[in-house]
Image (cartoon, rainbow, N blue to C red):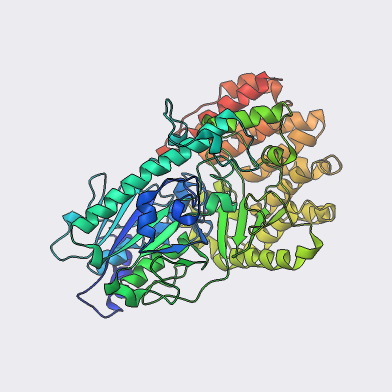
Amino acid sequence: MNRRTFLAASAATAFSEAFAQDDAKPNILWVTCEDMGPHLGCLGDTYALSPNLDNFSKSALRYTTAWSNAPVCAPARTTIISGMYPPSTGSEHMRSETRLPESIIMFPRFLRDAGYYCCNNAKEDYNLVKTPQVWDDSSAKAHWSKRKPGQPFFAVFNLLITHESQIRTRPHIWQHDLAKAPIPSYHPDTKEVREDWAQYYDNITTMDMQAGALISEMEKAGLAEDTIVFYYSDHGSGMPRSKRTPYNSGLHVPLMVRIPAKWKHLATADYKAGGTSSKPISFVDLAPTVLSLAGIKPPEYHQGHAFLGKYAEPEQPYIYGFRGRMDERYDLMRTVRDKQYVYVRNYMPHRVYGQYIAYQFETPTTAVWKKLFDNDKLNPIQQRFWKTKPAEELYDLTKDKDEVNNLAASAVHQPVLRHMRKAQQDLARKIRDIGFLPECAIHSRAGRGAPYDVGHDDAQYPFDRVFAMAEAASSMKSDAIPQLEKGLKDPDSAVRFWAATGFVIQGAAVKAHSGILMQALADPTPEVQIAAGEALGRYGSDQESAAAAEVLLKLAPIDKHGPYVSLMALNALDYMHPRAAGYKKQIAELPTETKGYPAKLDSYVPRLIERVQLELEKK
């Protein structure tokens, strides 16, 4: 047994021995689906056809303020399996792969050590290397029926039909009336948009039948009185500006829990079969909640709060969301929600909401929406997705469910803004949010170790200085420029990265500070070189822009620098066009493959190289 396995086993054993063994334990069944907001009849959606889940809701509690913490699948599932915010473990970026410390294990292992049979059918999709012995079976054939006689089970079944990719599957015979499709105010009302929304709801109806069949199978097996059932989706709707965007539209999920009478002592005061609860809960709460239902005290490193079971905690005032890299495009957003408001902090406001992501543009709505924007045929609300962002956003969900009326500048709402801003900053400090390191630096600083450990070591990650510079750089305020100048001389490369990024965000300030940015172009670290390169490439003189392009081209080869540096450099080159037009040949000849990295990253660099070439051809 290696050290990692030994420590994980010891941790699980210690926790399992900490609670009194009881022969009677509830079964726990998770029925999950993908890419779906709270669009069910039982949640008040009159366009939805969902009879099976509507019927299930009559004996379950509906949580009306439930969030995924990420608006895309892999980081959302990473949150669930670890019980930790991915920005604390370096795993927020789509299909990246980092490690947990050896003392931390994924939560099903605690259940297994307590005697549970744990099966997952079948999606994992974690941004973390699996810790030892997570599942008894994780496959397309995984099923609770494979357990030993009398053994309690924790079983997960994931339904795929509502995934983004199924919205655009054609040919399709629409079941829902296209004329009645509910089009949000930020989407243009076109045939393509109506077809996509109607097909999204058609897929929900199909999923509803599948979910009903799973629940019925469990009931026919005589397990209903012994089984606590959860139903939820992995994040919000798969439609553009929901998926990948950490607004309420991208994070709000349906969540229902049914607790049979036999286990009613595990319910909390707000639990009422057929009722609703507005308690704010999110995916980081699921792991501690399942352990709590099984009578296991959640470990201290869990960052969520159990909302049911023996170790249920008081209602929390806020839930939190995040966005990092989505496929081939970088961004950094943090969000907070209470029962009324959503607060958004954009740390890369110079990036438009709708950055070109090849996979997202396969959805007809995305393509037609962007085409109408390019042809100036959208109203101001519909245009916003294709423009750069403000530093802060605030929305009142009771009056603005589409989140289009930004109240951040409202004098009346300044107390709310300050309160929620503080909540976001407090969480970043509490979890030591390592997402403020560039992705390549997360990996280089951790090496074969765990980013979580790096994040909690001030010598490796001086969080306060890095976070302060990120705040200043993204503030978009001219009085932050002296702080940016000072930051370019900081001994930590992450501080220097944010200082250089601040000049990209300021844009017009680059010319007067090109001297120090030219020095940054020769920084020892690639992330600082790339940020300075984008600043000079876009806003410097022709000579400075040419020098920046040469540096970016040297950092772009994936076979020399790996995918994380390559992606950063290619993004910077893309954003400096048309000034990169003279480098079309060099970009076309860049390598598209390398070894030693997770295969799930393989498509991103080739996509970006192709996109940069296409954009330069237009100029």
Would you say residue 164 is visible in this rendering?
Answer: no
Residue closest to the far right: 512
Q: Is residue 545 left or right of residue 461?
A: right
Q: Nearer the viewer, residue 103 or 49?
A: 49
Task: Identify the residue shown where x is 60% and y is 51%.
Answer: 247
536 to 31, vertically: above or below: above
Q: Is residue 247 left or right of residue 68?
A: right
Residue closest to the far bottom: 20
The quarter in which the C terminus is drawn is: top right
Q: Quadrant of residue 472?
A: bottom right
Q: Position of residue 176 (x, y in %)?
A: 46, 37
168 to 162, vertically: above or below: above
Q: Nearer the viewer, residue 182 or 414?
A: 182
Q: Is residue 312 left or right of residue 195?
A: left
Q: Quadrant of residue 590?
A: top right
Q: Is residue 579 left or right of residue 359?
A: right
Q: Quadrant of residue 355?
A: top right
Q: Position of residue 74 (x, y in %)?
A: 45, 48
Q: Position of residue 512 (x, y in %)?
A: 86, 42
Q: Position of residue 235 (x, y in %)?
A: 48, 50
285 to 355, vertically: above or below: below
Task: Identify the residue shown where x is 59% and y is 40%.
Answer: 183
Would you say residue 469 is visible in this rendering?
Answer: yes
The quarter in which the N terminus is drawn is: bottom left
